[in-house]
Amino acid sequence: MKWNFCILIFSLLLTGCGSLIKQPPAVISYYQLDYKPQSAKSKVIDKTLSIRPFFISEMYNRNSIIYADKYKTDFYRYKQWISAPQVQITELFRRDFIDNGAFKAVILPGQLLKPDLTLSAAITEISENRSTSKTEAVLKITATLIKPAEKREPPQIIFQKNYIERVPCEKNNVESLVEALSVAAKEISCQLQLDVIKAVK
């Protein structure tokens, strides 16, 4: 009985000491959207274009990568964007519009040029969808092309359009998700370029 009591006390002491031992911090992996630009070829349009920083729905305004199944939405605690997704997509789309060379100039932040046209957008969803038979990446963006106010003329909306891309993930992991989201961003960027060029012409 005495030995059993001693063993019990020793076990409790070990448990207590174990809780004081520092556990290694969880490893956080960081991910970045990327793709080769696919330009919508066009003759140069004699106008300047400003692309404003994209907005994002509050639900997705976080560094953690979001996933959703049939009944809930949650996020990967140790899988994060290297920078805010709206910042990444804004920079990618600016790069794409510069690369296609369709406009006299694409105005970048800090440049003191007056734009002839302004493009703004809101990301309404960027996530992993698990509710279908195959996991897919979902990207939804609403874009608005505006002619800024001039003297006595108010701003004019040239067009507003919703873009939705769903791309199946090759594997059930975050790496495949980010790759699929990159493909979705590329498709939307190319379609947006075509729509802006068509609307301006």
Image: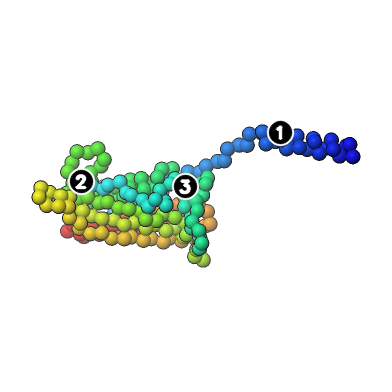
Image coordinates of residue 178 in percent, x first then y, are 45, 52
Residue extending farthest left: 152
Q: Is residue 75 visible?
A: yes
Tell me which corner region of the image, top left, top right, bottom left or bottom right, holds residue 38: bottom left
Q: Which mark is residue 64?
A: 3
Q: Is residue 42 visible?
A: no
Image coordinates of residue 121 in percent, x first then y, are 30, 53
Image coordinates of residue 4 in percent, x first then y, are 86, 39
Crowding at label 1, few (<14), some or many (≥20) Cα neighbours within 10 Å? few
Lateral position of residue 113 relative to residue 140, left or right: left
Q: Disc 2 marks which residue?
A: 105
Residue extending farthest bottom: 133
Q: Disc 1 marks which residue?
A: 17
Element under disc 1: helix
User: Residue shown at 38%/60% (left/top)?
Assistant: 165
Amino acid type at circle 2 is Ala
Q: Which mark is residue 97?
A: none
Which of these two is toward me, 24 or 1?
Answer: 1
Image coordinates of residue 143 in percent, x first then y, are 29, 56
Amino acid type at circle 1 is Cys
User: Residue shown at 89%/36% (left/top)?
Assistant: 2
Q: Is residue 10 above or below residue 40?
A: above
Q: CA distance from mark 3 to mark 1?
A: 34 Å
Q: Earlier in the sequence, mark 1 or mark 2?
A: 1
